[in-house]
């Protein structure tokens, strides 16, 4: 689906990403993970062409992603970001249907598609005519997901889609989101900093540090065969409730 | 858009003058307006159609307008012609002035009779106490405060050369409106001013005229000047004024207008009836007709200049937001235009576009640009990056992003800019009267000249109401244009 070859990207003279070679297989669920500033979001933005690499090339389904080709290629990609990025002046329906409307879909066709997507994402039908300001954080992310799925893209790119939600809603949405991915069977690339979430979603986890790939594999290989001490430390850096209980007992 | 088109058509109609129409001009002081009215009465008496474009401005504005054919005839003074308009030619006789004007396609008539020269006036009691009788006497009182008309401050025969000629040491010299100077003298805010020898106020305020003992001031004989090639019958009609008005008669007429509050048209008509046996009838507009005309003129100025400014500034604001380096240049240029004093901006337009509506509209247009450009720029650049990128990530091309996402989000800020421009425009348009564009500034100017508060209010109040209405209209537009989603308080 995506091939990134010898990519480097620097901001203000500081190398943010690279050199990186990465191939994303069609139908896979890939998670990009690493500490803040490791370049995982930049990598995702390179794929959709919101950022152009200094050296190297990104291709999507055999087509080079460039500033000229990106607008057309993006119609085959869905993109969801942390705070949803919803347009405050449009209702949920207007947000999700904006691109389809621009492409000349009839309102009927848009509404039919939205009904399907609302069922898929468990979004209440009567909420479609509310504005983003009138929706909860979880509902806003569902609208953002509907917007990304509207044109039935080949791939879904998600940048910390659940990062801004409180833990209970996040937990519920993780379940739902994985169910949606399974139903759709689409290629998914997700960015997160949460190793638990990464293992929950991804059969293919790419761990980054300082802009380069440290280790790639499933969660089991990361836990059982860490490539270096950093991987081991990162995998175990999050405290579970069990850990906390054990610590207070001693 | 439709209203805009109608306004343009209306403007085009007012711009094309009828061939048989004689346009009489006058400067923005009473004597000139009375003479303009008298000329108009005589043209009408001879069967011509006279339009009096009153109080268009000062000497340069009138003479330029005559050269450009925007007016056909007005009353001028020989001293002004030789010392100011044709100053470089050093003309020392009326015959030489007449010849120099003829080269420019302008005819000068014979003198109307009176000599309205400059003089220096002081409060009689104060002059007596200080023992000042001649201009030379002023030299030994360096602390005296002078207030001179703005024209007098700058002209060749005015203050600069008067000071040199008499060696006057005074440092406290202010330029101000001639009509306000009388009140300044009365209030003892200053000690001496320039007066015209036919000013009615000289006797009213009891001023002492200081003798010009070194013969500095040239002779200012009133004459009519007109464009060559006017209908001879019409020319013969207004030339009946020649030799008929002496200083006393002119001073009395000035007094009738300025002190007795009789209209210039009525005073000129009375003169034509009694001195020339012409059956002249004063043409005074009723207050309502006048208000209607000023409203129409003012609305035309504002509507056209503001619509053009919106049409021009909005794309510039978008460009500024899209291209940061060009944007800084655009904002800098618009900023510089805004720093030009509005009065100066109006006057700059005269050599380019003449007098009347069009130059005023261009000046107002330039003045209305900055708030719209700046707010469009600010509204667009303030959109959060995540929203901007979401639109980009959808695959919308730049034009569609602008139309569907960015402009709607910036609408409130942009409208606020337009509202600011509209209010500034309505206020600044009152200055259009200085260059003959009419509008609510006209009664304000006339009111200042005649010391008539009611007349000032006749311009000031409607201008204030119009500004409030403009604000109201754009607030209503804001409710209609700004999306409901932007007016909601975000959910907790």
Image (tube, coloured by chain):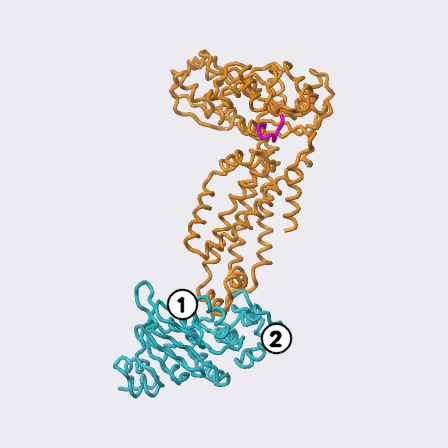
In the image, the chain rendered in orange is B
Position of residue B451 relative to residue B248, above or below, is below
SS for dot 1: loop
Q: Colour of chain A?
A: cyan
Most common SS among magenta residues: loop
Q: Is residue B341 magenta?
A: no
Residue B47 in sight from this viewpoint: yes
Residues under numbered marks 2 and 1 in contact, where contact means CB atoms less than 8 Å apart = no
Residue position marked by numbered label 1 in the rendering: A51
Q: Residues within 10 Å of mark 1 (few under 14, many from 20)?
A: some
Q: Position of residue B100 (x, y in %)?
A: 54, 20
Quarter of the image that includes the C terminus of chain A: bottom left
* Range of residues picked out in magenta: B66-72
- Residue identified by numbered label 2: A109
Q: In front: A153, or A120?
A: A153
The residue drawn where x is 35% and y is 80% is A206
Q: Nearer the viewer, residue A151 or B305?
A: A151
Protein chain holding label 1: A
Q: Quadrant of residue B49?
A: top right
Report the disc number at residue B459: none
Residue A159 rendering spot, x and y as whole percentages: 42, 74
Residue at 50% x, 85% y is A183
């Amino acid at each position: 689906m995506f091939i990134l070859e010898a990519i480097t990207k620097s901001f203000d003279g500081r190398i943010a990403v690279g050199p990186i070679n990465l191939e994303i297989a069609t139908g896979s669920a890939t998670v990009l993970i690493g500490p803040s500033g490791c370049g995982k979001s930049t990598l995702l933005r390179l794929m959709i062409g919101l950022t152009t690499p200094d050296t190297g090339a990104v291709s999507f389904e055999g087509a080079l992603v460039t500033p000229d080709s990106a607008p057309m290629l993006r119609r085959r990609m869905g993109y969801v970001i942390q705070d949803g990025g919803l347009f405050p002046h449009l209702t949920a329906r207007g947000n999700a249907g904006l691109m389809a409307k621009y492409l000349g879909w009839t309102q009927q066709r848009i509404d039919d598609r939205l009904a399907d997507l609302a069922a898929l994402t468990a979004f209440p039908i009567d909420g479609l005519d509310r504005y983003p300001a009138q929706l909860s954080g979880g509902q806003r992310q569902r609208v953002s997901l509907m917007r990304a799925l509207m044109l039935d893209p080949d791939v879904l790119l998600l940048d910390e889609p659940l990062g801004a939600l409180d833990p209970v809603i996040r937990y519920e949405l993780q379940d739902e989101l994985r169910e949606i991915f399974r139903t759709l069977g689409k290629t998914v690339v997700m960015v997160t900093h949460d190793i638990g979430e990464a293992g929950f979603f991804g059969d293919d986890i790419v761990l980054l540090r300082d802009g380069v790939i440290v280790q790639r594999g499933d969660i089991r290989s990361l836990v059982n065969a860490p490539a270096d001490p950093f991987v081991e430390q990162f995998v175990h850096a999050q405290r579970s409730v069990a850990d906390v209980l054990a610590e207070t007992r001693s | 858009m439709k209203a805009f088109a109608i306004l343009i058509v209306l403007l085009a109609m007012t711009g094309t003058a009828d061939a048989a129409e004689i346009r009489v001009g006058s400067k923005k002081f009473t004597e000139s307006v009375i003479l303009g009215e008298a000329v108009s009465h005589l043209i009408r008496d001879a069967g011509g159609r006279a339009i009096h474009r009153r109080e268009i401005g000062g000497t340069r504005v009138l003479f330029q307008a005559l050269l450009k054919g925007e007016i056909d005839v007005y009353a001028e003074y020989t001293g002004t012609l030789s010392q100011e308009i044709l100053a470089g030619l050093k003309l020392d006789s009326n015959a030489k002035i007449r010849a120099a004007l003829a080269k420019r396609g302008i005819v000068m008539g014979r003198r109307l009779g009176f000599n309205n020269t400059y003089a220096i006036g002081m409060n009689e009691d104060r002059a007596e106490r200080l023992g000042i009788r001649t201009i030379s006497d002023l030299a030994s009182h360096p602390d005296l405060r002078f207030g001179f008309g703005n024209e007098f401050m700058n002209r060749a025969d005015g203050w600069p050369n008067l000071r040199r000629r008499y060696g006057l040491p005074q440092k406290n010299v202010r330029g101000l409106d001639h009509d306000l100077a009388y009140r300044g003298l009365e209030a003892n805010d200053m000690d001496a001013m320039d007066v015209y020898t036919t000013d009615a106020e000289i006797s009213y305020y009891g001023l002492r005229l200081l003798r010009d003992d070194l013969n500095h001031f040239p002779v200012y004989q009133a004459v009519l000047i007109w464009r060559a090639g006017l209908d001879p019958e019409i020319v013969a009609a207004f030339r009946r004024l020649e030799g008929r008005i002496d200083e006393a008669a002119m001073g009395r007429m000035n007094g009738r207008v300025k002190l007795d509050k009789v209209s210039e048209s009525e005073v000129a008509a009375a003169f034509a009836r009694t001195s020339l046996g012409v059956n002249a009838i004063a043409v005074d507009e009723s207050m309502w007709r006048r208000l209607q005309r000023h409203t129409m003129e003012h609305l035309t100025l504002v509507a056209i200049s503001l619509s053009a400014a919106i049409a021009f500034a909005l794309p510039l604001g978008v460009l500024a937001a899209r291209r940061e380096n060009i944007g800084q240049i655009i904002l800098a240029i618009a900023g510089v235009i805004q720093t030009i004093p509005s009065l100066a901006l109006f006057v700059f337009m005269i050599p380019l576009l003449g007098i009347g509506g069009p130059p005023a509209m261009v000046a107002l247009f330039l003045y209305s640009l900055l708030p719209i450009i700046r707010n469009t720029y600010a509204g667009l650049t303030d959109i959060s990056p995540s929203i901007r990128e979401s639109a980009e990530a959808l695959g919308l091309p730049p034009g569609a992003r602008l139309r569907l996402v960015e402009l709607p989000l910036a609408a409130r800020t942009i409208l606020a800019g337009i509202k600011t421009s509209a209010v500034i425009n309505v206020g600044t348009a009152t200055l259009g009267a200085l260059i003959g564009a009419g509008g609510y500034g006209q009664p304000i100017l006339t009111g200042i000249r005649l010391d008539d508060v009611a007349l000032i209010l006749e311009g000031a109040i409607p201008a204030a109401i119009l500004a409030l209405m403009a604000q109201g209209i754009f607030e209503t537009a804001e409710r209609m244009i700004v999306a409901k989603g932007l007016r909601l308080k975000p959910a907790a």
